[in-house]
Image (cartoon, rainbow, N blue to C red):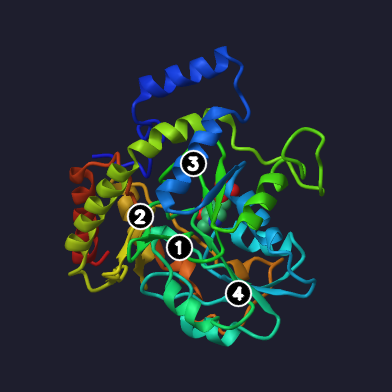
Amino acid sequence: MKVKFTNLYKLIPEKEKIFSKIQNLIRNAQFVGGKNLLDFEKKFANFVGSKYCVGLGNGTDALEIAVRSLHLKKNSEIIVPVNTWISTAEAVVNNGFKLVFCDINLDDYTISIQDLKKKINSNTRAIMPVHLYGNPSNMKDIKNIIKNKNIKIIEDCAQAHGAKIKNQHVGTIGEIGTFSFFPGKNLGAFGDGGAIVTNSKKIYEYALRARGHGSKKKYDHKFPGRNSRLDSIHSAVLNIKLKNYKSVIRKRNKLANIYFKKLKLIKEISLFRLNKNCSYAFHQFVIRVDKNRDNLIKYLKKNKIDTMIHYPYMLNELKFFPKGNNLKNSKNLGKKIISLPISEEHTEREINYVSKKIEEFFKKKI
Ligand SMILES: Cc1ncc(COP(=O)(O)O)c(C=O)c1O
């Protein structure tokens, strides 16, 4: 059996409906803005339970605009977990602020509360927890630590559409939540896309202008912004996909449960620790293998199973970023983790097959 990591074409639900919608938009030359965008912003805000949503060109812009919207002073420090996609850190340095890396937990790969306490100082103005792989960060403790301090929270939810803590959607717990709708994300458009969600009218108004050269309508520039729009076609696709999204989450959880059941007895593997209060989006299913990781990848490849690594390096290993200090858990993590195939289009049979091959590898002690 061949198990691909993802098949983006297969992931498109209701193809006929989507294709005919796009045809209509093209016929009516409806490419930018308009009803589909407004509809999506309303529906997505409703889906996460926030007052406002602003559709944007991609998740990286969402992070950069989010940081800028806080209007922080020049020497502000912003704390970012060291295991994330580069965008979270780029948003800090591209806005001219000081990037401070924080360690992550080894049981869920989100920001370490222990290390966070050590990284906060009088210059800290923001924290950017990343709900990595669809795993919610420990928002309760983060909020407790910064109580009575002038520190804001931007939640990077690029991988966590549908993830919740005690029924509250991630992205609505801090000041701002940012999302990506890159095609490979759980809720993906037909190209790049992103959004900010917030309950703050001020941040909402800022983001609305920031995405359109500082203006809400033509020639009404109030500051230099950028061009970062969620196009009409992407908005229409996302509107259709959002309707079906709860079943996507259900399927991903079902497949994740197979991995948990099958792999939990293999002592060489560390799995996520799931928290009873949380709902998970399972954007990635990541296992950690302290020894022989590369041989396992090769063995799976030989058996036609695709895997990936998220991420093969920690951000402090990139030459142009700060080295960071005391990043114990994340040290060499990129050499130990593997992302296994998981998407709503994978079958239970495929996931059972992947699990069986992993079991086989450890039995044979290859
Ligand atoms: C955690 C995280 N943050 C931010 C982004 C950036 O999103 P985009 O690719 O839409 O710019 C991604 C995308 O991979 C991501 O995984």
Above/below status of 97 relative to 8: below
Label 3 and label 1: CA atoms lie apart by 23 Å
The numbered disc on residue 101 is 4
Q: Nearer the viewer, mark 3 or mark 1?
A: 3
329 or 52, which is in the foreground? 52
- Front of the two marks 4 and 1: 1
User: What mark, if any, has residue 281 been given in the picture?
Assistant: 2
Q: Of the numbered discs in the image, which one, if any, rests on residue 131?
A: 1
Q: CA distance from mark 2 to mark 1?
A: 10 Å
Whichever of callouts 4 and 1 sits on the residue coming sooner in the sequence is: 4
| Residue 235 vertical position relative to residue 308 in the rendered view, above or below | above
Say which residue label 3 marks.
42
Residue 206's x, y, as percent? 69, 52
Which SS class for mark 3? Answer: helix
Q: Residue at 35%, 32% (x, y): give it.
A: 10
In the shown orientation, is residue 89 left or right of residue 223? left
Gap in angstroms between the C-alphas marked 4 and 1: 16 Å
Where is residue 84 drawn, in percent x and y?
A: 53, 63
Residue 112 in view, yes or no: no
